[in-house]
Amino acid sequence: MGKGKVKLVEGGLRHDGRRLDELRPITISVGVLKNANGSALVEYGRTKVLAAVYGPREPQMKHILLPNRAVIRCRYHMASFSTYERKSPTLSRREIELSKVIREALEPVIISELYPRTSIDVFIEVINADGGTRTASVTAASLALAEAGIPMKGLVAGVAVGKIDGYLALDIDEVEDMYGEADMPVAIAPSLRQITLLQLNGVLTPGEFTQALELARKGVEVIHEMQKEALKKKYLDVKVEE
Amino acid sequence: MESSVYVQNRELVTPGQLLGRGKLTITTPITVYSLDGKYYSAVVGLADVEGDKIGVIPLEGFYYPKVGDVVIGIVVSTGTNSWEVDIRAPHTAILYASDLLGRPLNPGREMLSDHLDVGDVILAKVENVGRGRATTLTVKGKGFGKINKGSLVEIDSAKVPRVIGKKGSMLQLLLNECKCEVVVAQNGRILVDNCPNNDFKEIAIMSIKKIEKEAHIPGLTDRIKEFIIKEKVRRGLFSG
């Protein structure tokens, strides 16, 4: 990689003016799609992800059903216009892998035993990609599930921590991911105190890893508060008609 | 251990929110779960606290059948001796021909579609929700069976309890003020029938939609009452 060619941290600030432990501006809206049972739109800076949840319902492929719990199906997809160069709309190897990883990040919180022989379908569409799409996807998908009324043990929020120019930085974007030394996406269910997604691309020392996890935990806590606000806002905004 | 509750009655809660700890009774087993002696909400809803009883009334949701529920279903297909009925649940339900007819079907003389055809609406009761087997319906009893006329209103099934109200107060209001027959089914389908005229029917339907939209805001019954009176005045229906 182009290590050392691009200066990512200067005077304690990153290329977009953020401090090392600062998140990008995050906006969350819930209930954006009419036809879906639940939906959410999440923006981490320039990264924009839409999630839609359908179900529990009976799928077309009956053989996937389980007798003791609901099957959770997840599709992560990047729109062909989401990147600088056109992305082929067919599911790539990376998208199939991310679908699985995101599904496994959500499965521990969904109380799927209540709805045997059904499927819960999660569709995630990346509208604009600027780093941290998988973590934004987890955040959006857990909100969409909550809006669909599916019983959950808690919300899940995700954030990535990276190592850039030797410093640990919270919520790295595309440029920092490309020229940085490490990228570690983390998803946590704060109410369960459980880590549901943890990946690491690059090299971190054991000490750095612990520090990075602590940084991610703090970031997730902030996002988790925003998630709760967004869910409540939908109801607090309804005004009594005179 | 001393039990304590951390939320107020009718407080808006989100999944994973700590509701209380200690020895509490859960009134809504699906929307509340307990872990290590602590109680958490599993859905977005309103907390329902009464002494050491705790529950969450969901604001979002879908219909999942329970034995004994009264439902309004729409026939989606006919089989050899049963109908497949959509009840807005994850699975379609089954209504056996022998249940509707009170005798076995005589395949040589009659067809299932002579009695109920695709698209017909029925009022039924959930007889059995089987694990691994289909949900079955029954139409035995007064008032059950095929619905021939009326208007069908669909609302979110999570809001059905609000249309009925505490001890049926809201439903009574609708019946008295709109002078219509209103049948509220647990799966969120509501039948409005036998109205004096079209205006009354429209007011009833508009009221139901208003209840659905403002279900989580306190003082709903009074607001609906006011709304019905205003609509009646506007349409010139008030006669002393």
Image (spheres, grey):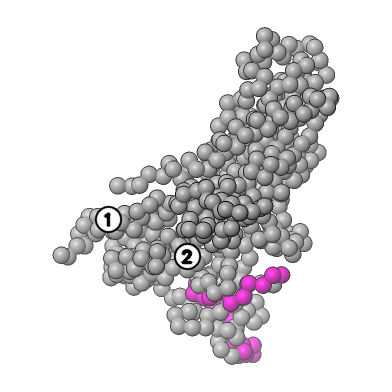
| Residue at image location 71% in from the left, 70% down from the top | B132
- Residue A225's place in the image compared with B21, above or below, is above
Magenta-highlighted residues: B104-132
> What amino acid is found at the position of numbered circle 1 in the picture?
Glu
Residue B28 location (% of width, % of height)? 55, 61
Labels 2 and 1: the sequence-earlier one = 2
C-alpha distance separating marks 2 and 1: 24 Å
Residue A156 location (% of width, % of height)? 65, 41
- Quadrant of the drawing holding the N terminus of chain A: top right
Q: Which mark is residue A220?
A: none
Question: Disc 1 designates what residue?
Answer: B226
Task: Tell whether A94 sits left or right of B46.
Answer: right
Q: Which mark is residue B189?
A: 2
B128 in the magenta segment: yes
| Residue at image location 58% in from the left, 84% down from the top | B99
Residue most extreme to the front: B1
> What amino acid is found at the position of numbered circle 2 in the picture?
Arg
Residue A178 location (% of width, % of height)? 76, 22
Q: Nearer the viewer, mark 2 or mark 1?
A: 1
Which is nearer the eye, B182 or B214? B214
Q: Quadrant of residue B225?
A: bottom left
Which is nearer the eye, B52 or B28? B52
Q: Please tell me whether mark 1 sits on a helix, a strand or a loop.
A: helix
| Residue at image location 76% in from the left, 44% down from the top | A100
Which is nearer the eye, B175 or B57? B57
Q: Is residue B182 visible?
A: yes
- Circle 2 packing at 10 Å, graded few (<14), some (14-19), many (20+), is many
Do the residues at pointers 2 and 1 share their chain?
A: yes
Q: Please tell me whether mark 2 sits on a helix, a strand or a loop.
A: strand
- Mark 2, chain letter? B
- Mark 1, chain letter? B
